[in-house]
């Protein structure tokens, strides 16, 4: 017997733009993620991703690219979904997190009619999941945005994007209401500052105050999310819909009260996003931040009420690492991609400098549950690592098993200590393209995919040691780790 509830949702997580492939097939339009992979060569690094993207960058990326299959674009789930879902079923998945590609449904983002082939594809995927009693967990928007709307109206910076999103979400709810009972609105909504172009379609032309654009875009996403929550409840009364944040504890570097204050500030910058989506109101602590940075959020009459009425049913989050908050800017930092933080002497880091911290996951679970008292769902967690394929084809990924086991142990302890946890979907359950590096070699999967950083390989799937391990974990509901 383990401490996990009987209906605990064990599974795995993916995102359309990192694993579907078929980027212009069957009527799909361009997404920001598609162009990002053509900007500055055939791949992006995090540093490049963080640079503002202009219209000229987009034009360069799209030039002569119709019909070209971008390297590092995906692992062809679009054509291999039956095989992949059968492999997930082989591990006993109870749930499978995937995202829907908005431009597969509305190629430019705001056509009058949805693309029939796009809708049919996800129908087929959901049917395949349900055949094995796997509950689909669907992210409506995960790190991609219809390029048409980015070019036309600067993505989420424009208020008009709310209506386009609501229409897209309603089409999904109506079409899949009998098949999908778990929904998420925006992936890692709190890091739109980093992924403004990718997830928000925000272009940087002109003398724009990017911080103003980012927070205005976030406001529009909050309203859109609240409207989607309301629509979901109305169309699928037995569904649950959650928000999704990237969560990373920022520990005070020392017991110096100034470090503690830094840690609180760091929390505010992140929890602002869940506060609005869960409590239904802008927190007062943001007022000073907005004043200090000359940010003026344009709200319309009725916005406050929409936020209050559209609060989410549960909170989901990704968790990979923790970081350090310090009032001293000097010091040793981890060399990692995505975020740099001071080094924590008590922790080891992955090859990409992400500091591995299982107890930090328990800290996070408590902090979030104390704050919100609504069910939590860990929808991403895992270790990006380079795998070695042995001569006989086996892959001994003990490091990945150790990482996951140590995190699952902390989850179980948190549940024992009173936290309400709905499920766990480790990231990249099948190897896919890394969001921050665009590489294949940063792998998370239980299932290996034969594809390298140059886009070469047979795309054949094979089971790693972790596949057999995770199957046992699910089989025993977490008792056999
Ligand atoms: C999260 C994203 C995912 C995913 C993951 C791992 O931030 O939601 O899309 O990719 O991080 O990151 P990476 O692929 O950069 O290793």
Image: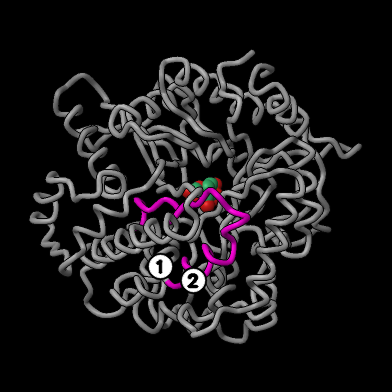
- Across and down, in percent, residue 349 comes to 50, 31
In the shown orientation, is residue 48 left or right of residue 448?
left
- Across and down, in percent, residue 220 comes to 29, 65
- The answer to whether mark 1 is within 8 Å of ligand 1 is no
- Location of mark 1 (residue): 197
Which disc, if any, is residue 32?
Answer: 2
- Across and down, in percent, residue 280 comes to 25, 49
Q: Quadrant of the N terminus?
A: top right
Residue in view at x 22 percent, y 77 percent: 207
Q: Quadrant of residue 298?
A: bottom left
Q: Which residues are magenta?
A: 167-192
Residue 172 falls within the magenta-colored stretch:
yes
Above or below for 399 versus 206:
above
> Few, some or many C-alpha atoms within 10 Å of disc 1 (few <14, some 14-19, many ≥20)?
many
> Few, some or many C-alpha atoms within 10 Å of disc 2 (few <14, some 14-19, many ≥20)?
many
- Across and down, in percent, residue 74 comes to 67, 61
Residue in view at x 26 percent, y 49 percent: 276
Do the CB atoms of the residues marked 2 and 1 lie less than 8 Å apart?
Answer: yes
Above or below for 41 versus 401:
below
Q: Quadrant of residue 382?
A: top right
Residue in view at x 40 percent, y 71 percent: 201
């Amino acid at each position: 017997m383990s401490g996990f509830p009987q209906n605990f949702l064990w599974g795995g997580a993916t995102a359309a733009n990192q694993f579907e492939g078929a980027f212009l097939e069957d009527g799909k339009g361009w997404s920001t993620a598609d162009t990002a992979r053509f900007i500055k060569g055939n791949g992006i690094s995090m540093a490049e991703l963080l640079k503002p993207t202009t219209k000229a960058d987009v034009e360069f990326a799209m030039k002569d690219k119709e019909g070209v299959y971008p390297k590092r674009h995906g692992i062809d789930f679009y054509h291999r979904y039956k095989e992949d879902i059968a492999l997930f079923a082989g591990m006993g998945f109870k749930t499978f997190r995937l995202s829907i590609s908005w431009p597969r449904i509305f190629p430019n983002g705001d056509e009058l009619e949805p693309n029939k082939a796009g809708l049919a594809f996800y129908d087929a995927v959901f049917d395949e999941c349900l055949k094995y009693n796997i509950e689909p967990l669907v992210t409506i928007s995960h790190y991609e945005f219809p390029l048409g709307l980015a070019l036309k109206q600067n993505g989420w910076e424009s208020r008009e994007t709310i209506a386009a999103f609501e229409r897209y979400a309603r089409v999904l709810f109506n079409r899949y209401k009998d098949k999908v009972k778990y929904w998420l609105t925006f992936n890692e909504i709190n890091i739109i500052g980093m992924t403004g172009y990718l997830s928000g379609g925000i272009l940087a032309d002109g003398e724009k105050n990017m911080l103003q654009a980012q927070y205005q875009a976030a406001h529009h996403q909050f309203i859109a999310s609240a409207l989607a929550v309301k629509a979901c409840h109305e169309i699928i009364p037995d569904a649950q819909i959650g928000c999704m944040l990237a969560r990373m504890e920022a520990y005070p570097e020392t017991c110096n009260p100034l470090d503690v204050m830094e840690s609180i500030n760091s929390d505010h910058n992140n929890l602002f996003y869940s506060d609005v989506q869960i409590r239904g109101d802008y927190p007062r602590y943001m007022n000073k931040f907005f004043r200090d940075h000359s940010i003026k959020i344009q709200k319309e009459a009725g916005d406050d009420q929409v936020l209050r009425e559209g609060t989410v049913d549960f909170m989901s989050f990704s968790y990979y690492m923790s970081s350090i908050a310090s009032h001293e800017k000097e010091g040793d930092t981890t060399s990692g991609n995505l975020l740099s933080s001071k080094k924590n002497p008590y922790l080891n880091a992955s090859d990409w400098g992400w500091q591995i911290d299982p107890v930090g996951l328990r800290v996070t679970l408590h902090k979030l549950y104390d704050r919100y008292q609504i069910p939590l769902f860990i929808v991403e967690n895992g270790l990006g690592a380079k795998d070695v394929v042995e001569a006989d084809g086996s892959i001994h990924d003990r490091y990945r098993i150790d990482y996951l086991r140590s995190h699952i142990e902390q989850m179980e302890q948190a549940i024992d200590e009173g936290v309400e946890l709905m499920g766990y979907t480790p990231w990249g359950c099948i190897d896919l393209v890394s969001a921050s590096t665009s590489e294949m070699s940063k792998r998370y999967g239980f299932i290996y995919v034969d594809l390298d950083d140059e886009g070469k390989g047979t795309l054949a799937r094979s089971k790693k040691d972790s596949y057999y391990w995770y199957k046992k974990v699910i089989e025993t509901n977490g008792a056999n780790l």
